[in-house]
Every structure is written in C-alpha cells, then in structure tokens.
C-alpha cells in the first residue's frame, strides 16, 4: 500500500469523535500520547530503547528494526495499535504516521474515554500534591492531587510524620475549604476514612497531617477527587480481567487517562511483578513516587 494511503487509513483509524460543543486543542510539547503495552525485537524511540510501560510523547518517532513489533494504546483516540518493522512510526496529535513500518492491527482500547485532550502528570506536577507546609524534611502522601474511586479510603504518608508521633489528621471539603469534615488525633502512617464520612462521587477533598498539640514539625498536604460510578465500575472490570503484565498495563493506561495516580502505581507494580523486563513501568513507578 502506498505511504500516503497508509497515512489516510491511519488517520481514519485513530480519529477522535468529538461533540459539537468541544473545541479541539493541540497537545502541549512533550505531552504523553501513548502507553506501550508490548515490545518484541529491537525498537527505539528517538534512539532510546522502549519497553512495556514506556510513555510515548507528541512528535516522538519509533524506529523499528526488522521483525520488531510494538503494541501501544493511544490516549487521544482510544485505539490499541500494533506496528511492525522495519521502518519508522511518528506520533502526532491523535494519529500515527508510518514510514516503512506497517500497521498489523487496530482495535478499541478497553475502558478508554474519548476525551478531547488528556495530559498526564509529570514528576514536577506530582510534587504539588505532597509538600511540607512548614519546616522539616519532605514527605509523601497518597492520594495526592489526583482521582480515587470511592472504595479507596486509606490515606497513607511517609517521611518525618511516620515516626509514631502524635498527629492531627484533617479532611476538608474541596468545594468549601473552610468546611472541616473530619478531624482526628492519630499515630502511625495511615488512616482509614470511616464509613460514616461518605466520599461523594465527583466531589473534591483536601487533607493534611501535622503534629498534634503544640509540638512543632512539618505538615503534609494532599488532595483528591472521587471518581464517578462509571469510572469506578470500568476500573473494577479491567482489574478483574487483568491477568498478565499486558492486562495490568491496560489498567495503568486507564488510570493514567483518568488521573487515578494511586491506582496507576499499583497497576504498574502488578505489571512489573509479572514481567520484570517492563522497564518502562519501573520508570513510571519511580516518577509517580508514591509512599
């Protein structure tokens, strides 16, 4: 098939249906567009080797040697593509341009949503969800500045506040910051939100951990939004279907798209357990850097 014809086919395969009220926006430079599910043979992205779990960004070119195969999910189009070498494949906004490489298969990506634009968190953005408010060494909290299903009720942290000292944990409404929903003195490095505090789908919350009483020390802050019932149901189904590393990377992809950072980290960890060669997943786990 001529090269221009291949491009036309791919444009159709990866086109994103948009509602008339939506306005199409361009991807920011360096914005992740795809998550690699599988690599066979010799494949690189801009001369760097890729593996299962690697994130591919706008404008990046894959170089596939003879008999190399790369399978990946495109965030912007909800498609899973399998591309084979020899040749090159360049990621553009919602499509893939092939030069010599050929498209083996294209199918819907399980659980994906046809969003106009999804921007995954970078390491620097993640820092804003877990910061020392005053004094002391830096710690980490989870969840932080992301989304969680309503079934995830455990708050965790590490750093200087996980040393067994008395702590004051506070949860406030994200919509009304001055509205304290829960305030409790505790010890340790985790807290299970009691059932009587309903986590409402779609609602936002903020939480802090600090030394109780008059004891000086650092304070950690986090925030989260509760996913709607549809997202939670899809996540549950994907988890139940995930058996191998590839299945868990599909879970991670879904979580990344929906900003479920804590759940994404768990999915990457599951993928690495099943395939220690998934170095891309190992790298993303380090970037998410959750306690």
Image (spheres, rainbow, N blue to C red):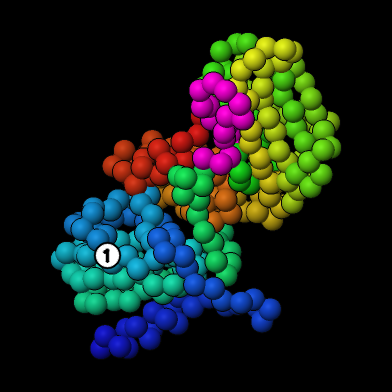
In this view, 266 is above or below 246? above
Q: Does the magenta stretch include residue 33?
A: no
Residue in the image at 20% along x and 71% along y:
87
Q: Is residue 216 left or right of residue 83?
A: right
Name the spot of residue 274 as percent of width and height, x first: 37, 39
Q: Which of 24 and 262 is in front in this view?
A: 24
The N terminus lies in quadrant:
bottom left
Circle 1: is it few (<14), some (14-19), or many (20+) Cα within 10 Å? many
Where disc 1 sits, the SS reads: strand
Q: Give the range drawn in magenta.
A: 127-143
Residue in the image at 17% along x and 64% along y:
65
Residue 280 visible here: yes
Residue in the image at 60% along x and 11% along y:
164
- Quadrant in the picture for residue 93: bottom left
Q: Is residue 38 left or right of residue 194?
A: left
Residue 252 visible here: no
Q: Mark 1 points at which residue?
A: 62
Residue in the image at 51% along x and 23% along y:
137
Name the spot of residue 260 as percent of width and height, x first: 58, 47
């Amino acid at each position: 098939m001529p090269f221009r014809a291949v491009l036309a086919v791919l444009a159709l395969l990866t086109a994103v249906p948009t509602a008339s009220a939506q306005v199409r926006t361009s991807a920011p430079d360096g914005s992740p567009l795809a998550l690699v599910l599988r690599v066979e043979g010799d494949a690189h992205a801009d001369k760097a080797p890729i593996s299962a779990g690697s994130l591919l960004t706008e404008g990046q070119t894959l170089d596939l040697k003879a008999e190399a195969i790369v399978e990946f999910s495109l965030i912007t189009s909800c498609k899973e593509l399998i591309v084979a070498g020899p040749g090159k494949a360049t990621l553009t906004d919602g499509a893939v341009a092939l030069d010599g490489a050929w498209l083996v298969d294209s199918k819907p990506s399980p659980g994906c949503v046809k969003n106009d634009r999804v921007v995954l968190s970078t390491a620097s953005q993640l820092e804003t969800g877990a910061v020392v408010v005053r004094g002391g060494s830096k710690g980490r909290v989870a969840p932080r500045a992301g989304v969680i299903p309503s079934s995830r009720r455990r708050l965790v942290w590490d750093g200087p506040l996980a040393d067994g000292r008395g702590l004051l944990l506070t949860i406030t409404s994200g919509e009304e910051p001055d509205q304290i929903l829960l305030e409790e003195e505790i010890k340790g490095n985790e807290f299970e939100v009691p059932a009587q505090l309903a986590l409402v789908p779609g609602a936002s919350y903020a939480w802090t951990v600090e030394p109780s009483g008059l004891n000086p020390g650092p304070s950690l802050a986090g925030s989260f939004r509760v996913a709607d019932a549809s997202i939670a149901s899809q996540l549950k189904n994907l988890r139940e279907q995930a058996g191998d590393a590839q299945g868990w990377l599909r879970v991670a992809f879904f979580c990344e798209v929906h900003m479920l950072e804590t759940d994404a980290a768990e999915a990457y960890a599951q993928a690495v357990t099943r395939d220690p060669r998934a170095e891309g997943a190992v790298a993303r786990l380090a970037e998410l850097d959750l306690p």
